[in-house]
Image (cartoon, rainbow, N blue to C red):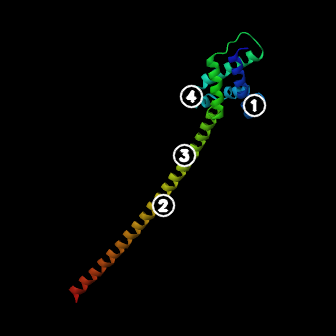
Amino acid sequence: MQSIDMEYFSEYKTVERICRDMYGEDGVKAYIEKMENCTNREKMFVRNWYDKLKTLKHLKWLRNQIAHDNEVYEVTEQDLTDITAFHTELLIQQDPLALLYKEIENTKKKQQEFKLQQRSIQKTQQQQVQYTSSNQQNDEGNNSKALTIFAAVAVVAVIAVIVFFFL
């Protein structure tokens, strides 16, 4: 086993322990299965989802080759970089599943905010309708009072004219 192989294997074991803590006994295998079981819609939330899944599967395959002492593998600097990058992503919660879960939470919050805004708009519209309706009633009431006053003044004027001419 070469130095790069041992370095890779050591880094992979650290990643495996983190995944076991999060996803149970199967570790990285469980992580991969969770990625595979996501819906196409969910996969769209994370940029390069399929590339990340493919890389993670390759890293798992490579680990198995090293563990079973197969000579058909070659650990490259890119493999070491990829496993180290995935380890870092896990630690800072920027791995694909963490990003997906964050996006799902953000979507739920946005939906709740939207529903609250819709309720607020509906309440405001109802208040405007009630205000408009009461103003119309007030206007009709004021118009009715004005007509009554005008009619009373007209009657008084007619009586005054009659009294003036006949007395």
Q: Quadrant of residue 57?
A: top right
Residue type at mark 3 is: Phe
Name which residue lies at 33% across and 78% down: 152
If the image is split into quadrants, where does the C terminus sit? Answer: bottom left
Name which residue lies at 49% across and 59% down: 127
Name which residue lies at 69% across and 21% down: 7
- Which residue has dot 1 on it? 20
Q: CA distance from mark 1 to mark 4?
A: 25 Å
Earlier sequence position, callout 2 versus callout 1:
1
Q: Nearer the viewer, residue 95 or 77?
A: 77
- Which residue has dot 3 on it? 114
Q: Is residue 66 above or below residue 126?
A: above
Instruction: Give the number of the disc on residue 130.
Output: 2
Residue type at mark 1 is: Arg
Q: Position of residue 123 (x, y in %)?
A: 52, 55
Earlier sequence position, callout 3 versus callout 4:
4
Q: CA distance from mark 1 to mark 3?
A: 37 Å
Residue type at mark 2 is: Gln
Q: Is residue 61 above or below residue 120?
A: above
User: SS class of the residue under badge 4?
Assistant: loop
Q: Residues within 10 Å of mark 3 (few under 14, many from 20)?
A: few
Instruction: Give the number of the disc on residue 47.
Output: 4
Which label sits in the foreground, 3 or 4?
A: 4
Which label sits in the foreground, 4 or 2?
A: 4
Q: Residues within 10 Å of mark 4 (few under 14, many from 20)?
A: few
